Amino acid sequence: MAPYPPVRTAAAATYVPRPPYTAPVRPTSPLMRAGQVLAVLFCLAGGFLGADWDAIISKGGSIEEARAGGEALGYAMGLAISPLLFSALFLAWSRKTRRYIPFLGVAFMFMSAAGRAGESREEVDRELSQTRGIANAFMDSAGPNVGDGSSSAPPESQAAKLVWAMNRALTEAPEYMREVGGRHGIDPDSLPAAWGTSRYMAGATSHPEVERYWQGYQAYLADFREGFVDWLKSRAEAHAREAGVRSGALRAYVEGMNRSDVDVAQMESLAWADSTASAALAFHRFLVSVDARVSYDAEQNMAMFDREADLERANALQRRVENAVEKLNRARQAERRRGMQKLDSLAVHLK
């Protein structure tokens, strides 16, 4: 009888199962390794170029600056790492494809940057279109009511935010103009009701409000010339901060405005507006001086001058006013054309 349990032979005891076949993994070449390092560095550089370095390296020590620096640093790291993480979702499952993660990350970063650039161009175009409308309304009259030509919510891209900030400042300009006019007792939007009528010409002494208006208008122009540029810059800077323009871009924006050769105080249209006021005052004062020799013809609705010399002088002074107004309108049209050209240049620069 055989013993239990059965005894196995030596041959049976030496059997070892064969492991499954695995393809050999080739070692990464130095050229591939260098490319991977460069790709990762490119992603890091792309991320940090999109951040606000002034906030990151701020030395002010305030809580606000520290928070801004932390937010900017986090934004930079997010821009740098997110393409690599996104690439890992596709390529990390195989040892053969992992080596290509940095390169796919660079591709994703390029696509993301292209998308952001396209959105930025669209926003800039939209804001510049609104700027053109505001500028046209602004140049149409001495005291325009341009309305709220800028969108209430700021755009996303930094370049469009800067244009948005200037648009907001320009829409507030008519209120500033009325405020300055109020300091001098006038409304820049409207002339005295009697101005230019035949009854006024026949009785200028009865309309002292005409002289007060033109004197106040000259004072208003001087005040406006002195303060408007600084006011516009301060309002644009305030709205840029409101829109969330990063500190580095904001500093460059303000310095660019300060270096700008576009000084509203030197506009030709302001000079001709002052000439118009001077001519209107001269016309009014002459009519006052000859008031006793001028009568009103109600049937013909005309001012009748007793002396031919007075009539000729009045006509000459009236033509002087009309010529000044015509040159003022030409100056405004020239300013509009130059402004549109500068906007076109700005559009190219921002894109």
Image (cartoon, rainbow, N blue to C red):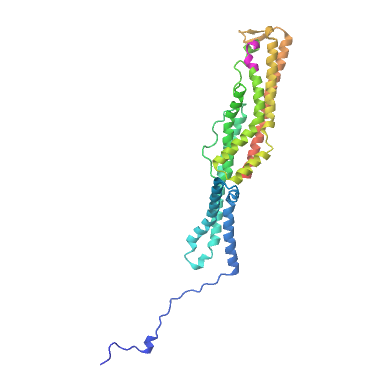
**Can the viewer see residue 84 in this picture?**
yes
Magenta span contains residue 206 = yes
- Say which quarter of the image contains residue 181: top right
Report the residue at 64% width, 28% height from top: 224
Identified at 38% across, 89% down, the residue is 10
- Give the number of marks: 0
Q: Would residue 158 appear left or right of 333 to someone viewing this image?
A: left
Q: Position of residue 201 (x, y in %)?
A: 65, 12
Q: Position of residue 147 (x, y in %)?
A: 55, 31
Span of residues in magenta:
203-211
Image spot of residue 168 (x, y percent): 56, 35
Looking at the rendering, in which quadrant would you find the N terminus?
A: bottom left
**Residue at the image point whose x is 66% and y is 26% from the top:** 221
Q: Quadrant of residue 283?
A: top right
Residue drawn at point x = 58 percent, y = 63 percent: 37
Residue 54 sits above or below residue 292 on the image: below
Q: Is residue 16 above or below residue 313?
A: below
Magenta span has 284? no
Q: Residue furthest right?
A: 309
Tell me where residue 261 sits by quadrant.
top right
Q: Nearer the viewer, residue 79 or 250?
A: 250
